[in-house]
Image (spheres, rainbow, N blue to C red):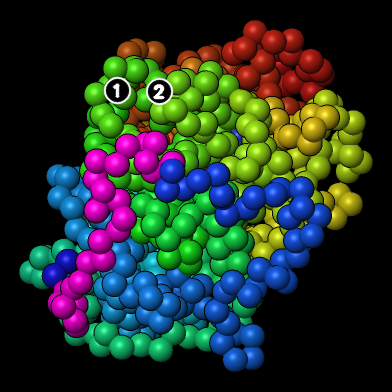
Amino acid sequence: MKVETPQKKEIAVTEHEKHPKATKQEIIKKFPVKVNLENYEEAYANFDWADAKKELSYFAGGKINAAYNAVDRHMHDGRRNKVALYCIDAKNKLEKYTFQDIYHLSNRMGNALKDLGVKKGDRVFVFLPRVLELYVATIGIAKVGGVVGPLFSAFGPDALRDRLQDSQAKVLITTPELKGKIDGIKDQLPDLEYVVVVGADQSKLGPGELSFDVLMNEASPELKCEQLDPEHPLYLLYTSGTTGKPKGVLHVHNDIIGHHMTSKWVLDLRDDDVYWCTADPGWVTGTVYGIFGPWSNGASVVTYEGRFDAQSWYEVIDRMNVTVWYTAPTALRMLMKAGDEIVYQNSLNSLRHILSVGEPLNPEVVRWGMKVYGLPIHDNWWQTETGMQLIANLPCMPIKPGSMGKPLPGIEASVVDDEGNPVEPGQLGRLVVRPGWPSMLREVWRNEEKFNEYFRIKGWYFSGDNAWIDEEGYFWFVGRADDVINTAGHRVGPFEVESALVEHPAVAEAGVIGKPDKERGEIIKAFVVLANGFSESEELIVQIKEHTKKNLAAHAYPREIEIRDTLPKTRSGKIMRRLLKAWELGLPTGDTSSLEED
Ligand code: PRX
C-alpha cells in the first residue's frame, strides 16, 4: 500500500532493540518476579469488572470506542512514536509502524468507508493475509462504528458465501489474489456493494470494485472516532457448531474491557514488550489478542505473513527480540518434531513468557518447552463466543502440565451435570460459565434460538466442552460434548464439510468426524457413499479432497476419506456421526436401536 503518512515517520526504539544481544538472564533481571497480576487469590476474591473500566478511556455520557482505546488514546499517553506494528512480509521484509502511523492510516480508512456510505452497524468484511492493511482496516471500520467481519484467508467460495450472505455484508476488503474466490459468487451476494482491493491494478477492476490505495490517498487522515454506546457491535465472527451452517458470533465495543484486562493479566504485557501472536486475525485469537488487547495496553505487536516452518519462526523471534509469544499446541508440537538442535541454533533469549491456546496442550510439550526454551508454556482456555480468555495458567501461579489453569478474576466457571448442578472435583461434566463477563457474545447473528441455546440450563453459559476440576481448582479439558472438530486449532463444523462434499458429483452421502491425530489434535475424516455410476479409486478420492479444499477451505478438507456402501442413520434420516466415530476408534457403539439399518 502506498499511502503517505502525514508526518515524518519516527520509529521508537524499544529497549530490546538497544540490547539485541541481551541474554535471557539479563532480560529476566530486567523483569524481576514482578508480574502484572501478582496475587491470584486476592484478585479473585476482590476484583470487580466495574474497577476495570478505570483502565479504559470512555467519552462523555459513558460512550466508548474500542479502536480509540487500541490506538487513538496513545496519541496522548507518550506512546505516539512507539512502534505499534512490526510487519514481516512473506519475503521477510520488515516494516515498522508507530501508533501515530496506525492512527492516521485508520483515520483515512474510516473516512474512506464513510465516503462509500458505510453507516454505523454496516458489516465490512476483511479478507486479507497478515499485512498492514488488515490492521488498518480493522481499526478503521471500528472507528466509524462499522461491524468488522474477519475472514480467514484460507476460506474458499462456499465458506465465503455462507458468511457474506448471512451477514449481508456491504463492503469486502481483499487482495487481487484472494478476490478470485469472490468473483464467482458475487451474483449471490446482492447486499455486497463494494469490493475494495489492496494493491489493485486499476485497469483490472470490475464494476463495484475499488482500489484501496486510491481510496486511502483521497481520504483525510483526520477523523473523530465515533462515540458509541458500549453495546454497539464491534465484530462479527463466524464459527462452527455441530449442526447447520456457521453462526455469526456478535461482539460489542465494551468487550475491550475484557481484552484489556486479560492482555494485562494473562499475556502479562508491559510497555517494553515485543509481542507476537501467531494466530491469524481471521480467527478470534488473532483479532482479540493480535490487535485489540495488546494495543489497548500499548504493546508493540509483531505480525508475520509467512507460513509456518520452525526455522522461520525462530528467526522472527530472534530478529524482533520477541518477549511474549502467544501460539498454539499444533505449532508447538510441530516445533517439538523439528527437534531440539534447531532451537539451540537460534538464540531465543529475548523470550520471557510463552502462551498457548485453542486445543489441548499435551503435558509432554509443556515439559519439552521447559527444557528447550527454559520457560513454562502457559495454556489458557476460551472460545469465539467468550470473546476473551476465561481460564488460564497465570504467570503468578504454578503450572500443572495438561491443565488449562483457573478461572480469571471476575469469572465464575464450573463443571456441571446435564441439569446444571456442579459435580464433585475429579468428576467429568460440562464446562460452564456464569454470564456477566464483559466480552461475552451478545447475539448469534439474527438467530435468537441459537443464542438462547447457550444459556438453556440454570442460566449458565454452556461452552460445549467437557472438563473436570481438581481439588486445587485447576480445570482440565477432556473433549467436546458435541461433534465440532478441532483440527490444528481450527474449529470446523462437520455439517459444513459434509455439505461441501456432497456438492461433488461422485458423492451421494457424507458423514464427517474428527479423528485423533498426534500432531494436529484431530484430522477431518469423511465417510462417503458414492453416487451411482462412480467407483472407488485413489484418483477419485484425491479429486474429492481437492474439491473440498478449493470450495470450502484449505484447512477444512478431509485428510482421510473412507468409501462405504451405506452410512448409519437415525429413523429421521440424520447421519449418526457418533457411530462413525465409535467405529473409527473401535469403541462400543452403544444404543443403536434408532438405526435405520445395522
Ligand atoms: O474445544 C475448545 C477448544 O477450542 C474451542 C474454541 O474454539 P474457537 O472458538 O475457535 O476459539 C479458539 C481460540 C480461543 C473450545 O470450545 N479450546 C480452546 N482453548 C483450549 C481448547 N481446548 C483445550 N485446551 C485449551 N486451552
Residue 299 location (% of width, % of height): 41, 60
Q: Can residue 159 be seen?
A: no
Q: Can residue 373 be seen?
A: yes
Q: Nearer the viewer, residue 171 or 567?
A: 171
* Above-or-below relation of 566 to 147: above
Q: Secondary structure at mark 2?
A: helix
Q: Is residue 7 magenta?
A: yes
Which residue occupies 29% across, 79% down?
Answer: 104
Which residue occupies 47% across, 31% down?
Answer: 375
Which stretch appears magenta? 3-28
Q: Nearer the viewer, residue 53 or 130?
A: 53
Residue position marked by numbered label 2 in the rendering: 372
Residue 409 location (% of width, % of height): 72, 54
Q: Mark 1 and mark 2 in contact? Answer it, CB < 8 Å.
A: yes
Residue 595 location (% of width, % of height): 75, 20
Which residue occupies 56% across, 50% down?
Answer: 35
Rendered image: mark on residue 344? 1
